[in-house]
Amino acid sequence: MFDFNLKNISLTAFAGAAVMAGSASAQEACTNYTVQDGDTLATISITAYGTSNYQPIFNANRNAIDNPGQLAPGLVLALPCEDGSLPNGQSAQELIAQQEERAAANRVSNVYAPPIKMVTGSNWTPFADDSLNGGGIFPRIASTALNRAGNQREYSVSFVNDWTAHLQTLLPLGAFDVSLAWNIPDCSNTTYEWSEETTYRCTQFNATVSVYDTVVGFVSLPDSQYASARTYDDLKGATICRMKGWFTSDLEEQGLGEPTITLLRPTTAKECLDAVLTGVADMASFELESIAAEMSGMGLTGQDLVENPNVTTMSSLRFITHKSNPYGRQYMAMFNRGLNEMRESGEWYAIISDSLNEQNQKNNAETN
């Protein structure tokens, strides 16, 4: 099965399109690789990096991959280098510095507009944590977007670890303007029965375009019947652990709402993994990167918990504001303008690459 041992393995990712020339037949980091029949992102990642966490490859080729579970033979993928750059590409740090210098030359302080108050939670590495550079991926992307595309807005970022409070009190009561970051499902899809949580998110919040598309994995004990499940139907009857405050719409879309499954909702990712290890839960399900980071911090490898690549789902994470906020739509439009410019310049990918590389170095230091 798949190994989540991240020692000396880079989690970096960079750039947004597959490279269509100069490909290699070997699956090696810092090269371009042509997909062969039978390849999956997980098997490519294992060969190139020694880990089945293929989110970095997915990030690096986001514009070319619609479904991470289906790869067309002949597709050329850019396999990121250890520092996060593409083969023969500019480093993440160089690109970030270049864009900061350009933005600083055009920056004008807007003293008449109040700072936009943003809130996120800590202990969500590598996405948000007050110990990380700039607060992690989402605070870095959000703060940068507010100073791109002519926005030039002041802001503040706070960390409140009670994620439920973000949706239930902090945004509705105006204590903060924007929360980073949430899954808002496709609210036009009414083909499945919405839970109360999905209904609340669809009716009460405005959201940006997708800030980050993440792969949501399912891990279990190696000898579990669910480790070899082929379809979502095979997960019916399972006890699945996902942290309190996290979305469940992806499960609902696959017919895995309660009571079809039993859903455990502890506070932390560690509690979910512990629940699987002790047999309280059959599977834990959340972002692959968070699974990998948490397993590394707990000293776990693929001999302890395994990921089932047959039942991954996708999640588009977005910045949100409550619909009662009179400036909410304006703020979402500002973020969208900034995000679009960052994607075009490559800065969006560089920030993700740099943040993931920082987290990887931290993981390696803890395990050495």
Image (cartoon, rainbow, N blue to C red):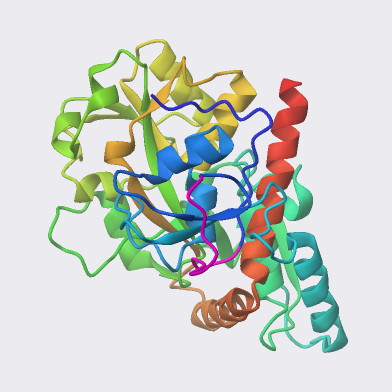
Q: Residue at x 62, y 59 (%)?
A: 14
Residue 4 shows up from this direction: yes
Given residues 184 and 27, the one toward you in this image is 27
Residue 53 shows up from this direction: no
Spot occupied by residue 168 in the image (x, y as percentages of width and height): 45, 53
Given residues 107 and 215, the one toward you in this image is 215
Side of 64 relative to 231 (left or right): right
Residue 26 against residue 116 in the figure, above or below: above
Residue 367 against residue 85 in the figure, above or below: above
Count of numbered marks: 0
Residue 107 magenta-highlighted = no
Side of 277 relative to 4 (left or right): left
Spot occupied by residue 181 in the image (x, y as percentages of width and height): 53, 57
Quadrant in the picture for the N terminus: top left
Spot occupied by residue 306 in the image (x, y as percentages of width and height): 40, 24
Residue 279 against residue 83 in the figure, above or below: above
Given residues 99 and 322, the one toward you in this image is 99
Side of 137 relative to 266 (left or right): right
Spot occupied by residue 326 in the image (x, y as percentages of width and height): 52, 80
Q: Residue at x 49, y 41 (%)?
A: 45
Question: In which image quadrant can residue 297 be found?
Answer: top right
The residue range painted magenta reads: 15-26
Question: In which image quadrant can residue 264 be found?
Answer: top left
Magenta span: predominant SS is loop
Quadrant in the picture for the C terminus: top right
Side of 208 relative to 353 (left or right): left
Residue 220 against residue 169 in the figure, above or below: above
Q: Residue at x 64, y 35 (%)?
A: 9
Question: In which image quadrant can residue 344 be found?
Answer: bottom right
